Amino acid sequence: MKQMIKFEVKRMLRNPGFYIAMMIGLIVSAAHWIVEVLPVVRRMDKYMSLDFALLYPPNLYNSWICEGNNMYSYLYLLILPILVTLPYAATFFSDVNDHLIEFICTRADKREYFYAKFTAVFLSGGIVSCVPLIFNILLCIAVVPVIKPQAADSTSNMVPKGSFSALLFTHPAVYVAISLMVIFLFSGALAVFALNVAFYSNHIFTVLLAPLVLNVFLSALFQLLNLQSWEPSNFINPAYSSPRMIPFVVETAVLLIITGWEFIYRGRQEDIC
């Protein structure tokens, strides 16, 4: 099993789609830093020379891309369902149509192949979603102070009812780590959803766009039901101020259980090797 997982992860790292998705994410993160953060930094010297006792200086936790309402945060979360499929989600479709799966299954157990494919696709989605965000955090650390945000400074969207809101003001690094974990897990779940679509489609673009369609459908559905916290783009957004952990846990668990069971069980049963 370990050898098959290593094999699939190596294939993932050799896939051009992995680096294309990563580059797109890094470009968005860098653009946010250049347009939104650097202008604030240029005013820092003037700000620090003034005696405004009631003003709190800009800091990492209200400057990074996912903390606050800015165009780049919305853009990143909008394209995220596409980014997570580019690295590796369509390779099962390609393996079947190119008959590569037959070659692999003659040299390894079919069950191991499906477990390894599921694991590699999940990891690929999580990695390409979080690495650009970590890159953005590092860029911000280089130019703004890493100090705790203050609830009274009115620079944060977080309110007391928000999930882990106390952590943001007491242990902000832990809050950011939890937020990245949420994005990693849901992005991985979206990526493996595309695996199942390969069973029902004859077109690779359908597989690649399936997570985006699912994301739009869920957002529209919960918007109609007036359940905004259940919209994926809201509950994975660290700046979202309403409780979001229950929607995240439920939707991620349902996606992983259904897609994992169907992909692994159906894959082992169907005569595709």
Image: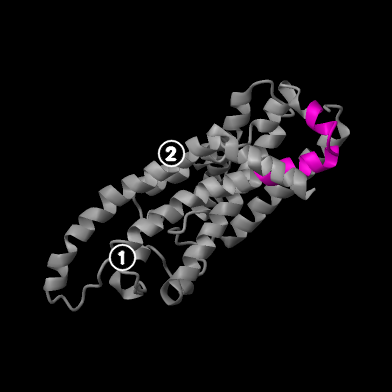
Q: Closer to the N terminus: mark 2 or mark 1? A: 2
Query: Rounded to the nearest whole Å, what is the CA distance between mark 2 and mark 1?
Result: 28 Å
What colour scheme governs how the chains and residues are painted in the rendered image of this protein? one colour
Q: Quarter of the image holding residue 17?
A: top right
Query: Which residue in the structure is indicated by mark 2?
Result: 24
Q: Quadrant of the C terminus?
A: top right
Q: Is residue 47 visible?
A: yes
Residue appearing at x 31%, y 51% in the figure: 33
Q: Pick the residue in front: 79 or 103.
A: 103
Residue appearing at x 33%, y 48% in the figure: 32
Q: Pick the residue in front: 42 or 148.
A: 42
Neighbor class of circle 1 (other Cα within 10 Å; few <14, some 14-19, many 20+) is some
Amino acid type of the residue tagged 1 in the rendering:
Thr
Disc number lying in front (2 or 1): 2
Disc 2 element: helix
Q: Quarter of the image holding residue 137?
A: bottom left
**What secondary structure prevails in the magenta region?**
helix
Residue appearing at x 48%, y 61% in the figure: 242
Q: Pick the residue in front: 261 or 177.
A: 177
Let me know if residue 114 is in the magenta part: yes
Q: Which residues are magenta?
A: 102-120
Residue appearing at x 72%, y 21% in the figure: 97
Residue 59's x, y, as percent? 31, 66
Residue 192's x, y, as percent? 67, 41
Residue 262's x, y, as percent? 79, 40
Residue 155 is tagged as: 1
